[in-house]
Amino acid sequence: MFDKTVRTVDPAQRERHADCMAAISADRSKEAFAELFDFYAPRIKSYMLRLGASDSEAEELAQDVMITVWQKAGMYDRNQASVSTWMFRIARNRRIDAQRRQRRPELTPDDPMLRPPEIEQPDALLARDQLEGIVRSELVKLPLDQLRLLQAAFYDGLSHSEIARAFNLPLGTVKSRIRLAFLRLRGELEGGT
């Protein structure tokens, strides 16, 4: 049967945890931190799991929250909130930050996608321009039926089956005409170079 009782925080425990925060802030008390760590770290991990974090991510986030407790215990004000409220607010914010990082990964300056393209050397640029000119002049020499299919494949980006439907041709005919066009172009280009 479902337990309908409301769990309340033991006032003595609440004060004890607030005293631990004060001891961490004032004296860097490792004993006080260990007491809070033993009590809250498993609870924070469980909370992270309920929020959808993986086991390793939940463990890492719980560790991160506890490090923040150690570093920023002086920011805790027992008159504003309980230790648990303060810590779980930090945990929730850490989870939100982690989700944002996953959706928008950090960019690294070494990423090849962020580098500008290399400047093409003048001789390579000239050679490419000459080759493009030769290809254009050879394309107009192709039979019209081969040229149309080649244009549909490379300029329009159609697949062989899409070309067959568009031109009302058998698929084998489309493939053989494109292949013949390539062989003819290759022969002209290899013969000319």
Image: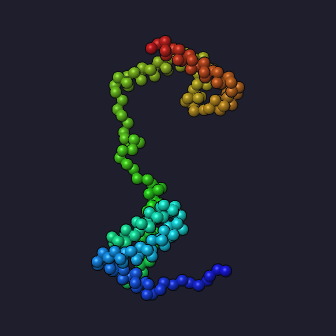
The structure residue drawn at horizontal position 41% and vertical position 42%, both measured from the top left corner, is 113
Q: Quadrant of residue 114?
A: top left
Residue closer to the observer: 84 or 45: 45
Horizontal and vertical percent for residue 110?
Answer: 36, 44
Q: Quadrant of residue 155?
A: top right
Residue closer to the observer: 6 or 164: 6
Residue closer to the observer: 130 or 54: 54
Colour mapping used in the image = rainbow
Residue situated furthest bottom in the rendering: 12
Residue situated furthest left in the rendering: 27
Horizontal and vertical percent for residue 23?
Answer: 32, 79
Horizontal and vertical percent for residue 59?
Answer: 46, 64
Vertical arrangement, residue 132 with respect to residue 94, above or below? above
* On-image quarter of the C terminus: top left
Q: Quadrant of residue 121?
A: top left
The structure residue drawn at horizontal position 51% and vertical position 69%, both measured from the top left corner, is 46
Vertical arrangement, residue 159 with respect to residue 100, above or below? above
Horizontal and vertical percent for residue 85?
Answer: 44, 77
The structure residue drawn at horizontal position 59% and vertical position 29%, both measured from the top left corner, is 153
* On-image quarter of the N terminus: bottom right
Is residue 127 among the parts visible in the rendering?
A: yes
Q: Is residue 184 left or right of residue 125?
A: right
Is residue 93 among the parts visible in the rendering?
A: no
Q: Is residue 83 left or right of residue 146?
A: left
- Total labels: the figure holds 0
Residue situated furthest top in the rendering: 191
The structure residue drawn at horizontal position 53% and vertical position 14%, both measured from the top left corner, is 187
